[in-house]
Image (cartoon, grey):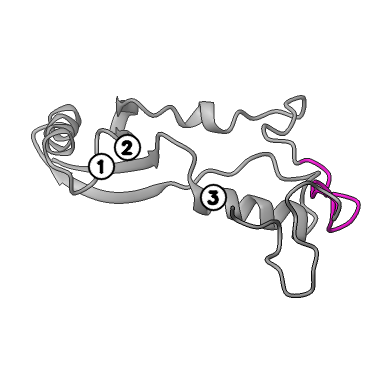
Amino acid sequence: MKTPVQLWVRLKVIDLVTQTARITLTEKLDFADTLRGMTHYWYWGMDAEAADAKSALEGIDRVIRLDSAFTNQNKHLYRLAGGAGLVLGDLALEKDFPVGPDIPARNPVAKPPMDSSAGMSGPDAAGADTSAYGPIGGSAT
């Protein structure tokens, strides 16, 4: 029996590509009020041939756990889904993006600084070389 199978994979830690895209969308393109969250997934859709959907998922799950072609068990979470609501793996997609109008944005973005010098020490800071030919931000001693 042919069974359609979906494999969703994401990193366990913060994905820097996703973080950069989120910052671009919220700070540069002004989607801070409408963007609820962002997660980077790798997706594979495939058809598996087996006696039933459960044995198809178990066979693919065994390959995922033993081989690093799809996931690295140290770095990734995955969800393997097949027909009749069967799901294997440790990734819960519904926890990444809960739905509902009463749910606030997960990662509110801080307001940008007032000017480009915010958070930088002044030129009178100890050890800073303020001459025209000195290093920026201080000198190594």
Disc number for residue 28: none
Badge 1: residue crowd in 10 Å (few <14, some 14–19, many ≥20): some
Q: Position of residue 26 (x, y in %)?
A: 74, 51
Residue under label 2, please give it: 75
Which element is circle 1 on? loop
Residue type at tag 3: Thr
Residue type at tag 2: Lys
Real-space Cα separation, disc 3 to disc 2, in angstroms: 16 Å
Q: Position of residue 62 (x, y in %)?
A: 12, 32
Q: Quadrant of the N terminus?
A: top left
Residue type at tag 1: Thr
- Which residue ends up furthest to the left in the rendered image? 51
Foreground residue, 101 or 117? 117
For image coordinates 59% across by 44% down, the residue present is 38
- Residue 94 vs 50, above or below: the answer is above
**Which quadrant of the view contains residue 57?**
top left
Badge 2: residue crowd in 10 Å (few <14, some 14–19, many ≥20): few
Q: How many numbered marks, from 0 up?
A: 3
- Which residue ends up furthest to the right in the rendered image? 114
Span of residues in magenta? 110-122
Disc number for residue 18: 3
- The mark nearer the N terminus, 3 or 1, is 3
Magenta highlight on residue 119 = yes
Q: Are marks 2 and 1 in contact (CB under 8 Å)?
A: yes
Q: Position of residue 70 (x, y in %)?
A: 23, 46
Residue under label 1, please give it: 71
